[in-house]
Image (cartoon, rainbow, N blue to C red):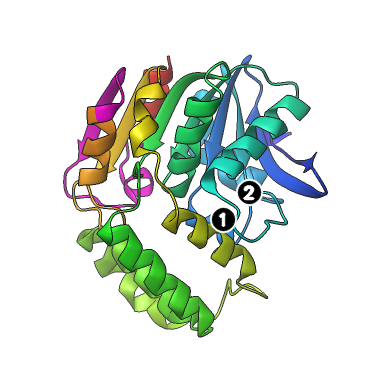
């Protein structure tokens, strides 16, 4: 199959957790997406998601995981990390590198803190060690839009808060169509993920992350703020940092060398 891509799921308790995998390398890279996973999962998207990882696929088997299908009320970031560790056990995976983006980076922190024996290397992209005022304001605002069923405003605001001005100038003409596609049947999954973010705080435990860690941020991040990346750097011992000037929360999409940087760090 092209890129050796496949779609799969594991059973976690009384529900399922979907993943997309690609590559055939002996090393394993786990990728955890952000809050967008609350709107649409990776189910059935292996071929679509594989392309940015083309450089990895001879040496690595890459797994991109969604959160589990049914999330209980009060489901925390730490519990998400615990379920991720369970999923790896089900798949027989004993050692991984982990890359978490945004909310995925929060989950990745707790995987490294609570399951250090699992994690060889850690990449935390456009994320934070705890909720700050910017995160609180943004996530609360998005929850309000979702509660009102205003999908168009939700999509526009997350886009405006994510991308550089140069990118936005090209895509604003598409805004009238943003609310017409991708609206979920229910926002319950989005709310569970958003509520978990608002309760997140791993700051005092960052010293427990002992594996080599690469922190990537955007200087113009309007979603979590660039200071969040520096907080991570200051408190994780074996860490290095790269901040993209002129880019924001979607640096992982806009920066042409993002995946090459991750690849070189993991090597």
Q: Residues within 10 Å of mark 1 (few under 14, many from 20)?
A: some
Q: Which residues are drawn in magenta?
A: 235-260
Q: Is residue 38 visible?
A: yes
| Residue 246 percent coordinates (x, y) | 17, 50
Q: Nearer the viewer, residue 20 or 74?
A: 74
Q: Residue at x 24, y 37 (%)?
A: 231
Residue 253 located within the stretch drawn in magenta: yes
Check disc 1 and report the residue beneath it: 37
Marks 1 and 2 in Cβ contact (< 8 Å):
yes
Whether residue 80 sits left or right of residue 201 in the image: it is right
Q: Residue at x 40, y 23 (%)?
A: 208
| Number of dots carrying numbers | 2
Q: Earlier in the sequence, mark 1 or mark 2?
A: 1
Distance between the alpha carbons at the discs numbered 1 and 2: 7 Å
Question: In the picture, residue 142 is in which quadrant?
Answer: bottom left
Q: Is residue 3 visible?
A: no
Q: In the picture, which quadrant includes the N terminus? A: top right
The answer to whether 133 is drawn above or below residue 57 in the figure is: below
Q: In the picture, which quadrant includes the C terminus? A: top left
Whether residue 24 sits left or right of residue 90 in the image: it is left
| Residue 185 percent coordinates (x, y) | 67, 75
Question: In the picture, residue 29 is in which quadrant?
Answer: top right
Of badges 1 and 2, nearer the viewer stands 2
Q: Residues within 10 Å of mark 2 (few under 14, many from 20)?
A: many
Q: Residue at x 52, y 46 (%)?
A: 77
Whether residue 237 sits left or right of residue 90 in the image: it is left
Q: Secondary structure at mark 2?
A: loop
| Residue 49 percent coordinates (x, y) | 57, 45
Q: Any mark on residue 67, and which?
A: 2
Q: Secondary structure at mark 1?
A: helix
């Amino acid at each position: 199959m092209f890129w050796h891509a496949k779609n799969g799921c594991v059973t976690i308790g009384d529900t399922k957790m979907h993943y997309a995998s690609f590559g055939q390398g002996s090393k394993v890279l786990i990728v955890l997406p952000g809050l967008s996973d609350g709107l649409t999962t990776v189910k059935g998207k292996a071929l679509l998601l594989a392309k940015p990882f083309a450089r990895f696929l001879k040496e690595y088997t890459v797994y991109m995981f969604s959160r589990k299908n049914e999330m209980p009320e009060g489901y925390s970031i730490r519990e998400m990390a615990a379920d991720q560790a369970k999923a790896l056990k089900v798949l027989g995976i004993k050692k991984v590198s982990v890359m978490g983006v945004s909310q995925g980076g929060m989950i990745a922190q707790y995987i490294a803190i609570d399951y250090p024996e699992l994690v060889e290397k850690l990449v935390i992209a456009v994320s934070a060690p705890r909720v700050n005022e910017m995160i609180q304001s943004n996530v609360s605002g998005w929850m309000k839009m979702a509660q009102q069923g205003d999908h168009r405003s939700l999509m526009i605001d997350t886009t405006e808060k994510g991308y550089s001005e140069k990118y936005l100038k090209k895509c604003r003409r598409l805004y009238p169509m943003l609310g017409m596609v991708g609206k979920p049947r229910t926002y319950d999954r989005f709310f569970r993920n958003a509520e978990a973010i608002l309760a997140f705080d791993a700051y005092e435990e960052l010293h427990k992350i002992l594996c080599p860690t690469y922190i990537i941020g955007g200087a113009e991040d309007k979603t979590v703020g660039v200071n969040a990346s520096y907080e991570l750097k200051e408190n994780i011992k074996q860490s290095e940092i790269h901040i993209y000037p002129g880019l924001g929360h979607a640096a992982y999409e806009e920066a042409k060398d993002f995946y090459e940087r991750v690849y070189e760090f993991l090597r």
